[in-house]
Amino acid sequence: MSAHPDVPTALLESPSFQLERLRRRTRDHVEADLADYKTTLREYWVLTCLVSGDAASQSSLCDVLAVDASDMVRLVDALEKRGWAKRERDPKDRRRQIVTSTKKGKSAQKELAVLVSAAEDRALDDSTSKQLKHLRKLAKSIIAAEED
């Protein structure tokens, strides 16, 4: 991160500050592109989870994505309105909602995945491929350690 005269050195050296700046930069690029499709990054994440696996309960999606249950209801509502997902009662436990992607949702996710990847690449344009590979590896190891 290049020195910025207005940001104290202590912040520039802080991992939480660095990660927040990186998160904000990538999220801003991705959200701007997704706005053209009238969708959000979190909706894309939910859709990707649905497309990548079998049916999921709303509570398991909350756990995977670290999203509050009431927020997840709104996210799934938005996907349902677009015809990208559908909810059904779990026949084994009528209290649980099972969420699945639709054909339209699978198609949309493929298109959005290309868009999200391109936006992330633009956000990190100044990075070399070696730096990005290292960033991804580091992020995976930190997340894996958190789950242990």
Image: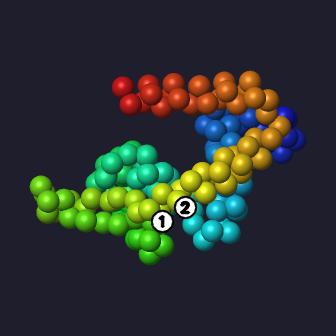
Q: Is residue 64 left or right of residue 27?
A: left
Q: Name the residue that disc number 2 marks.
A: 108
Say which element carries label 1: helix
Amino acid identity at mark 2: Ala
Give me the residue at 44% from left, 62% from top: 103
- Cα separation, mark 2 vs mark 1, equals 6 Å
Q: Amino acid at mark 1?
A: Lys
Residue 133 or residue 82, whichever sits in front:
82
Q: Is residue 27 visible?
A: no
Place residue 22 in its image quadrant: top right
In the picture provided, is 45 more to the left or to the right than 14? left
Q: Is the residue marked by circle 2 packed among few (<14), some (14-19), or many (20+) residues within 10 Å?
A: some
How many marks can you see?
A: 2
Image x and y of residue 14, in percent: 66, 32
- Classify 31 as above or below 19: below
**Relative to 138, 54 lies left or right:** left
Q: Are marks 2 and 1 in contact (CB under 8 Å)?
A: yes
Q: Give the farthest residue toward the right.
A: 5
Q: Looking at the rendering, in which quadrant would you find the C terminus?
A: top left
Return the residue at label 1: 104
Q: In which quarter of the view is residue 68 placed? A: bottom left
In this rendering, position of residue 35 left or right of residue 60: right
Q: Residue at x 71, y 49 (%)?
A: 118
Q: Looking at the image, which residue is at 25% across and 62% down? A: 97
- Across and down, in percent, residue 101 comes to 40, 59
